[in-house]
Image (cartoon, rainbow, N blue to C red):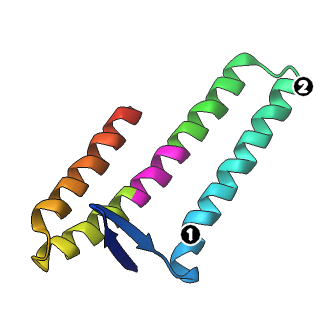
């Protein structure tokens, strides 16, 4: 994975092979949401709908963790080069802070 660092922000540059697992995960989530919509349209049992919502939430959290891990890895690499170590560390903290707000 490649990245660029500009204006205090680190931008990931994934190639097609690196994007594929994340995009597959998001398509699965999209399918889960469509399934939930169908469940609601069909007046399915409420706890089944809630269970599907919980599965969607867990899947979204996992996708977010994948993105966070990639970002932190790239930020650590950039920080280890020493060019703007403080900026890279600030970027890591900013990403973690945003992730923690997601709750």
Q: Which residue is mark 1?
A: 21
**Residue 91, position in %: x, y?**
24, 56
- The picture quadrant where one finds residue 90 is bottom left
Q: Residue visible at 82% across and 22% down? A: 44
Q: Which residue is mark 2?
A: 42
Would you place residue 57 above or below residue 59 in this image? above
Answer with mark 1 or mark 2, whichever residue precedes in sequence. 1
Q: Nearer the viewer, residue 59 or 102?
A: 102
- The picture quadrant where one finds residue 75 is bottom left
Q: Nearer the viewer, residue 48 or 28?
A: 28
Q: Residue visible at 58% across and 81% down? A: 16
Mark pair 1, 2: CA separation: 31 Å
Main SS of residues in magenta: helix
Q: Secondary structure at mark 1?
A: helix
Please provide the residue range marked out in magenta: 59-67
Describe residue 43's horizontal placement relative to residue 3 as left or right: right
Is residue 66 highlighted in magenta?
yes
């Amino acid at each position: 994975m490649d990245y660029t660092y500009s204006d205090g922000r680190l931008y990931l540059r994934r190639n097609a092979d690196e994007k594929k697992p994340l995009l597959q995960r998001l398509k699965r989530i999209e399918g889960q949401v469509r399934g939930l919509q169908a469940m609601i349209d069909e007046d399915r049992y409420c706890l089944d709908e809630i269970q599907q919502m919980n599965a969607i939430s867990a899947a979204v959290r996992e996708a977010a963790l994948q993105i966070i891990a990639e970002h932190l890895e790239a930020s650590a690499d950039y920080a280890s080069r020493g060019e703007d170590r403080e900026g890279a560390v600030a970027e890591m903290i900013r990403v973690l802070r945003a992730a923690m707000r997601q709750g």
